[in-house]
Image: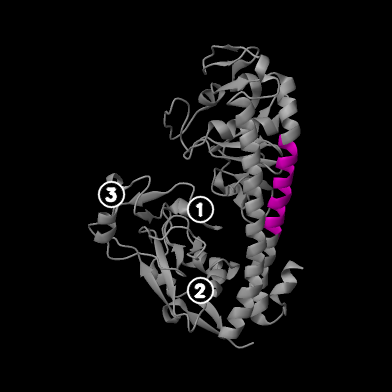
Amino acid sequence: MATTDVEFGEAPFEIIDGDRGKNYPKQKDFLNSGHCLFLSATNVTKSGFVFADCLFIDEKKDSSLNKGKLRREDIVLTTRGTLGNTAYFKHTVLFENIRINSGMVILRCDREKILPVYLYHFLRSPSFHEQVNSLRSGVAQPQLPIRDMRRIKLPLPTMPEQKRISGILSAYDELIENSQQRIKILESMARALYREWFVHFRFPGHEKVTFVSSPLGKIPEGWEVKKLKNVCRLTMGQSPKSEFYNEMGEGQPFHQGVTNFGNRFPTDRLFCTVEGRIAEAGDILFSVRAPVGRMNIAGKKIIIGRGLSAIRHNYGHQAFLWEQLRNRFTKDDMMGNGAIFAAVTKSDMEGIELVCPPSLLIVAATTHFEPIHSEIGVLTNQIQNLRKTRDLLLPRLLSGQVELKPAEVAA
């Protein structure tokens, strides 16, 4: 297969910076909804665009900016803070007006010479990220300046080969997206059941229940309000010295904070060769430093750093506790009564108040939650395996080692 290596500075696409001039939006310019979505670092992830938390600017502010407006088929690449995250502005993205912030660039392809989807797949490959890591500058705030980015090498096969490679890899993406959609449906089912029974109090037999006052409002008679320390075992993380960290898999997985959090389960990047504060498999990982309140579930025994705590229900009701905390902490950094915290202490955590239904009702709800959580776990593993296979395929496809048709991937 004919493949030519070209540097980004000579590749058939533009590298477009965001607007950094005097009209760059200030905090007061951002809105919760509006004319133009203004991307933040949280919107461009390893998995593409995520639009859970969005900032907008109005039409007047949008028109005052000269650069950084996305067109369909553009690719966004983060160049400050978390480097190398990328998202593809496909036609399936519902927003029309999107601008990048100053920590990103747009890659706009000459479509007669390079397919945007092919470039997108390369930007997610190990080869690209190895080059990014070798070029990064800055310690407190890592950066990838455009002048350095231009030195990155891109394997550029012929257009027919680009189409073949993109078709194979996109088939994996489709399977991943289908599983992600299934997970969203399952999560919605669990969330709806929790709210129906434990927020709106329409649980089996609720017609015969009377309500009483509590510190958290009216609750059914026989229910209680307890502090987290009386319901759960809480382990606050503590960070070993950095000299014991490694990325080679030596020791146990180590998580300092939310950097490697997924939708539900974290991925392991750092390891630690000395024993520390432990989260066991199934423990709820709760971020105690900004962003406070973000949660994942430990899939295995891990060491936790000072940015995390591990929570386990005293009576094993982990599935119920997960739904309970997810319902309680719907926004980052919000801890009770709308108060905003950049960090919380063990005392703060222990004092979190929870509505505690009778055990029999928790057990009844768990019979619904656990199968849902189990299926989500299976789908999550499938997604991880599909991603690993997809990412390993690109260099093998470029070298001609693999000859697959897109239809064979889904078979």
Give the residue displayed 55% in from the left and 67% down from the top.
130
Q: CA distance from mark 3 to mark 2?
A: 32 Å
Q: Is residue 382 rendered magenta in the image?
A: yes
Q: Is residue 395 rendered magenta in the image?
A: no
Q: Which residue is mark 2?
A: 116
**Image quarter hosting the C terminus:** bottom right
Amino acid under label 1? Val
Q: Which residue is mark 3?
A: 26
SS at mark 1 in the image:
loop
**Which class describes the residues within 10 Å of circle 2: few (<14), some (14-19), or many (20+)?**
many
- Front residue (pair 257, 383): 383
Give the residue displayed 60% in from the left and 79% down from the top.
163
- Front residue (pair 121, 273): 121
Q: CA distance from mark 3 to mark 1?
A: 22 Å
Residue 50's disc number: 1
Kindly report the secondary structure that dominates the magenta region of the rendered protein.
Answer: helix
Residue 185 x %, y %: 64, 46
- Residue 411 located left or right of residue 267: right
